[in-house]
Image: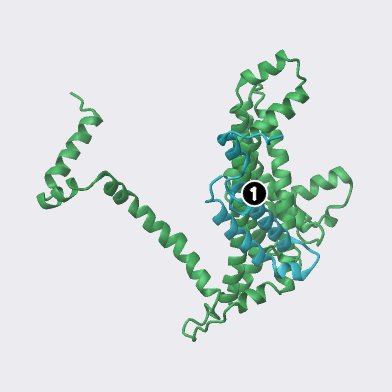
């Protein structure tokens, strides 16, 4: 039995045009999570080491957000 | 015979044209629309660069040096990331961050809940609602310096009206109600004042949100026999949410920088129980004169607020798209 052949437009829509790390939606969500994490690390009262690394986390998240928010949807 | 303002404007324009030297007039006429637009916004951009952008970049530069503002002639050395390392390993600054977080969390929560509740009530359009709206807005219009000073009097244990009211309601002697002197009550004293002052602002933004909801949506819900409770959670809250989030964003950013009220009410005391980040920053910059280190501290706060603003703008866009 031969395999069903999809029309060209259906095949194109089934396959994502860009990989995960080049799409705006998911990468913005990742950047926002990193910013949120950095924010919590900055203001948490539990461990000084988390506070120490909060700025790096915040900066990483912010720069990531600035870059990925320019990606196409 | 009276001359209309339009004629005056025309005459003034004609006079300006006549007074402009011909070579300059020819040059202006040759400018494109885009060039004229740039010419008009250039002063604003120059002012913005001078007042906002330049100090930001100057603070970033200073945060990498050992510069001290009380020794302007001393040699300025590059210390690399040393100031950031000290700020991010200092337990006292860490404690001030926690105080800030406590203050921001409670003020935002109280202001949002009370502000939205007030907006919901005012939106009912009962008799005299305009008068009550004006009355509620008064605290927001006062200067923080005035508010700080008169709340200090209200909190006075012996003569203060606040202490008297609490004593009247609870039976606790007024001398024991030390709102600004008590370690456990002082943070709440500031939270109460900030909530009193800025709840009207949140109310105003929420009221704009509530007034933007079209009546026909409620009418359709009435036809579908939706209860008031259901209408509130399915129409009012989702449609007013972008406005509520905007209010939270504005107040959140403002309260992270909160300085004047805390400085006037407690000055960071008793001890360091109300020493929020901005007070710690002021002490580092203008009492310890560690300008480089305090610049690094300010940049850390800036990055935190900038990151927060990014999250809120994304959340706001998502809510608007619904």
Q: Colour of chain B?
A: green
Whether B93 is drawn above or below A68: the answer is below
- Residue that lies at the very extreme toward the front in this rendered image: A1
Question: In this figure, what is the number of numbered marks?
Answer: 1
* Res A33 → quadrant: bottom right
Residue at image coords 66%, 42%: B199
Whether B78 is drawn above or below B47: the answer is below
* Res A51 → quadrant: bottom right
Binning the other alpha carbons within 10 Å of mark 1 as few (below 14), some (14 to 19) or many (20 upward) gives some
B171 horizontally vs A55: left or right:
right
x, y (%) of residue B317?
Answer: 59, 41
- Residue that lies at the very extreme toward the left in this rendered image: B22
x, y (%) of residue B168?
Answer: 84, 44
Nearest the camera: B151 or B238?
B238
Nearest the camera: B312 or B18?
B312
Q: Colour of chain A?
A: cyan
The chain identifier of the residue carrying mark 1 reads A
Q: Is residue B201 visible?
A: no
Whether A68 is drawn above or below B91: the answer is above
Residue bearing mark 1: A26
> Circle 1 — which element?
helix
Quadrant of image for the N terminus of chain A: top right
């Amino acid at each position: 039995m031969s395999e069903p052949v999809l029309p060209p437009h259906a095949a194109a829509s089934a396959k994502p045009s860009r990989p995960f790390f080049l799409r705006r939606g998911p990468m913005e969500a990742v950047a926002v999570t990193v910013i949120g994490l950095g924010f919590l690390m900055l203001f948490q009262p539990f461990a000084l080491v988390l506070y120490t690394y909060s700025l790096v986390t915040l900066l990483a998240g912010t720069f990531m957000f600035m870059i990925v928010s320019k990606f196409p949807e | 015979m009276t001359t209309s303002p339009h004629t005056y404007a025309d005459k003034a324009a004609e006079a300006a044209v006549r007074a402009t030297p011909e070579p300059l007039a020819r040059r202006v006429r040759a400018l494109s629309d885009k060039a004229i637009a740039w010419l008009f916004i250039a002063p604003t951009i120059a002012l913005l660069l001078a007042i906002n952008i330049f100090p930001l970049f100057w603070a970033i530069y200073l945060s990498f040096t050992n510069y001290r503002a009380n020794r302007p002639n001393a040699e300025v050395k590059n210390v690399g990331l040393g100031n950031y390392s000290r700020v991010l390993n200092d337990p006292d600054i860490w404690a001030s961050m926690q105080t800030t977080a406590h203050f921001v969390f409670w003020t935002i929560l109280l202001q949002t809940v009370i502000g939205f509740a007030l907006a919901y009530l005012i939106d009912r359009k009962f008799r005299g609602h305009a008068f009550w709206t004006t009355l509620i807005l008064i605290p927001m219009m006062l200067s923080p310096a005035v508010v700080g000073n008169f709340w200090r009097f209200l909190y006075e244990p012996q003569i203060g009206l606040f202490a008297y009211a609490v004593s009247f309601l609870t039976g606790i002697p007024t001398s024991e109600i030390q709102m600004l002197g008590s370690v456990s009550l002082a943070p709440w004293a500031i939270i109460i004042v900030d909530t009193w002052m800025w709840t009207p602002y949140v109310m105003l933004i929420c009221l704009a949100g509530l007034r933007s909801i079209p009546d026909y949506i409620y009418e359709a819900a009435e036809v579908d026999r939706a209860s008031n409770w259901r209408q509130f959670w399915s129409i009012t809250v989702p449609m007013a949410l972008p406005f509520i989030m905007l209010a939270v964003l504005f107040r959140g950013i403002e309260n992270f920088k909160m300085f004047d009220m805390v400085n006037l009410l407690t000055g960071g005391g008793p001890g360091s129980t109300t020493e929020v980040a901005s007070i710690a920053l002021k002490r580092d910059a203008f009492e310890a004169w560690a300008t480089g280190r305090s610049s690094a501290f300010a940049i850390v706060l800036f990055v935190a607020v900038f990151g927060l603003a990014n999250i809120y703008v994304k959340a706001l866009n998502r809510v608007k798209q619904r």
